[in-house]
Amino acid sequence: MLRIAPIFMIAILIGPVLAGLFHIIVPAFGHDPELGQIGFSLQAFYALKMMPAIMKSIWLSYWLGLMTAFISLMLVAFFIASYRNSYWFLVIKTMFKPVLAMPHAAAAFGLAFLIMPSGFIIRLISPELTGFIRPPDWLIINDPAGFALLLGLVIKEIPFLLLVILASLPQVEGQYSRVARISGYGKNYAWLISVFPLIYKKIRLPIYALIAFATSVVDVALILGPATPPPLSIQILRLMSDPDLTQRSIAAAAAIVQFGVTILALITWWIGEKIFIHFGKKIIMSGFRFQGDKILGFIGFVGVGGAIFMTFVGLFLLALWSVSGIWKFPQVFPAELSFSTWHNEASQLLKVSWRAIIIAFFASFIAIILALSSLENEYQRQIKLSKWAKFILFLPLLVPQVSFLFGLFIIFLWHGLDGNYFSLIFAHLIFTLPYVYLLLSDSWNGFDIRYLTSARLMGKSQMNVFFSIRLPMLLRPILMAFALGFAISIAQYLPTLLIGAGRFPTITTEAVALASGGNRRLIGTYSLVQTLLPFVVFAIAALIPALLFHNRKGLNNE
Amino acid sequence: MSEAGLNLNNVRIKINGVSLLNIDEKIADGEILTLMGPSGCGKSTLINAICGFLPKGFSCEGEISLDGQNITDLPAEKRKLGVLFQDPLLFPHFDVKENIMFALPSGGAKSERLEKAYQLLKNVNMQDYARRDVATLSGGQKARIALARTLASNPKALLLDEPFSKLDEKLRENVRQSVFEVIRGQNLPTLLVTHDKADAKATNGKIITL
C-alpha cells in the first residue's frame, strides 16, 4: 500500500502539468476539433501579436517576476545578515508566520487601502501636510509601470523567503561567518559572503518557484496591477473568459507565451546568478573589506520590518472598512461603525466560506495522507530523494498556473469533469501537496529514529511503531502542514475559477471579483474572512497538541 | 602602557553574573600557552571572549590587549587575531587557493595575491592542492589549509580552539607536529585550549590546568 503512495504523488504532480501544457499546445497551433479547426496553423499566435500592447504585457510579466525575486531576496538576506542574533530577529520570526498565512489577495487589498490616493497614509497627513480635502488624482495603485503590483508581491514574498531561509539556516555552519570576521570582514558582509552562498544553493528551487509565480500572478495583478495594458496573465484570463470560443486558441497561444516568459525569466535569473558569482568572487578574491556594511542591515530592516508592518496595518484596515459606516476623506477613522455589511452579507459569506472550507479540508487532508505515506515508504525502504524527485515536487510551482490550468480546464471540459467538487479538490491538491510534503519532510527526516528502533526491538510491528510512536510525536508538524495546505487552498483563485467553471464561487474568488466594484466595505469584509479562515486553522493546529500534550514537556516545545 | 604580545589582564568571564573563569596571563611573542581542562570549564568561552564572540548571557571583565592595544571592546574583524577552530571550516564554495585568498588583506595585484596564497600553501606543504575542491581533502589536509588561511590575514596572535580534536589519533600526531612547526616559525603569541595532554606536551610551553 505504501509503495503506491509515491506513484500517486508523482502522478498528481506531473500528470496535470504535462497534460495541461499539452492541451494548450494543441489548440494554440490551430487544432481544435470542437471548433472545426483541424491541422496546423500559427494563426492564433499572429492574432495574439496583433493584440494592442501585448508586448508591453509580456514585458510587465517578465520584469515583475525578476524584480520581485531580486528585491525580496536582497532585503531578506540583508536583514538576516545583520539581525540574526538580535531581539528584532525574534520579533520578526514570531510575526512573519501570520503574514505568510494571509492570502495574497487579502494582503493586496490591505496594501491598496493603505497606499491608494484615498488610503490610510494620505488620510493620516491630510489636510494638515498636504492640503487635500479630496483624494488626489494620483494613479498609485494600478499604475501603468506596475510598481504597486511589485510592492504587493515583494511584501508577500518576503515572509515566504524568510520561511525558506530560516529552514535552511540550521543546516549551514554559522561558524563560517566567524572565520570571515576574524579574517577582517565586517559582521554583515562576512555573513553575506561566507554563509549566504551556501544557503542560496539550498533555496534555489523555491526562488525559481517565486519567479514563476510572480511572472504569472493573477489575483494580486487584478487588484494592484496595471490595467492598460495588464500583465500577460490577466490578458490570458480575459481571453479564456471570452464568450467567443474562437478566442480560445488565442488564449492557448498566450498561455504558451506566458510559459515562455516564465522560462525566459528563469534563464535570465540563472545567467544573472552566474554573472553575480563571477564578479562577486573577483571582488572577494581582491580582499575588498566593505566597511560600510551597516547600511545593508538598515536596508534589510526597513524592507522586512516595513513589509510585515504594512501587512498588519493592511489587515487592520480590512477589519476597519468591514465595520465602517460613514468614512469620508480625509477622516483618518470612520465617523461611525456599522455591522450592516456583515449583516447583509452573512448568508453569502457563510455559503462561499463553507465551500472554501470543504475544498481546503479535503485538498489538505489528502495531501497529508499522501505525504505521510510517501515519507514512511522512503523511511522503510531507505530511499533518499534525488535532485529530480525534488524538481518534480516543485514542478506545479515552477510552471505558470495560468498556462497549464487552462489546458487542464479544456481536458475537464471535454470529459464533462469541470465544475464539480472532485475536480476542484484535485486541482487544489496539485498546489497543496508540494508544500505539505516539503514542510513535513523536514520534521520527518529530523526525527530521531532511535525511538523507532527501540520500539521495534520491543517486538512492535512497523505499522504499530508508525501509529503509536511516529505519528503522536510528530503530531505538531503534521497539523502545521495541514494548516499550511489549508491556507494555500483557501488562497487559490485561478484553479477555483477555471476548474470550478465559475459555478463554485469561494471566499477568494468572491473577494477578488469585488476588486472591480470598488465597494471597500464589501472588500474589507470578504478579505477579512478570507484571512481569518487560515488563521483559525493555524490556531487550532497549534492548540490541539498543546492541549493533548499539556503534561508532556518534551512534546510541547516548538 | 601594556606590553607586547597577548595580555589577558585579570580577565573574568561570567555566565549570568556567575563567575566561570578568571585568568591573568601574558603570552609573549613566540610563546605558546596551553589552557587545559575538562569540557564546560570555559576554555572555548575564553577564546570566544578574546575574539569578541561571547554569546548572550556571558560577560567579560578585565582587559585584553594585543601588542599594547586594548582590544576588549573592538569588533572581531578589527582585533587582528587568527583562530583555528575545532572544525577546519574551509568555505565549500571556494577551492583551496580561494580559501587562502579570501583571508589575505586587501590590496595588491591579482598575480601578487596568487603568489602569496601559493607561498602560504607551500609553508604547510599543500601547494599541489591549490585548485582542489576542499570537500575532496582529508581531515589532516583540511587542518593544514585552515592554518595557512589563518596565517594569511597576518594576525598578531593565534588562538587554537582544540584544532586537532576531530582528527583520529594517528593523524592527530602527524598534523600536530606540522602545525606547531609552522606556528613556531611565525613568532606569534599563541593560546591553545585543549583537553588532550599530548597537544599540551607538544607545545613545549607553559600549561595551565583549569
Image (tube, coloured by chain):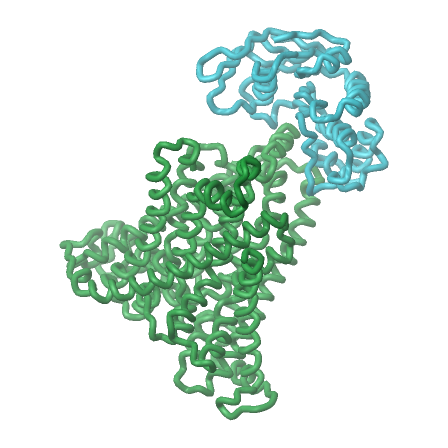
Chain colours: A green, B cyan
Tell me the quarter of the image containing the C terminus of chain A: top left
- B134 or A488: nearer the eye? A488
Q: Residue at x 38, y 57 (%)?
A: A103
When asked about the image quadrant of residue A152, the answer is: bottom left
- A201 or A356: nearer the eye? A356
The picture places residue A48, in percent across and down from the top left corner, at 52, 81
- A171 or A276: nearer the eye? A171
Res. A66 visible in picture? no
Residue B106 lies left or right of residue B120; in this view the side is left
Q: Is residue A39 above or below residue A71?
A: below
Res. A181 visible in picture? yes
Q: Residue at x 26, y 59 (%)?
A: A524
Residue B128 lies left or right of residue B93; in this view the side is right
- A417 or B113: nearer the eye? A417
Q: Residue at x 77, y 40 (%)?
A: B136
Tell me the quarter of the image containing the N terminus of chain A: bottom right
The picture places residue B149, in percent across and down from the top left corner, at 73, 30
Residue B191 lies left or right of residue A251; in this view the side is right
Q: Residue at x 58, y 8 (%)?
A: B23
The picture places residue B140, in percent across and down from the top left corner, at 78, 29
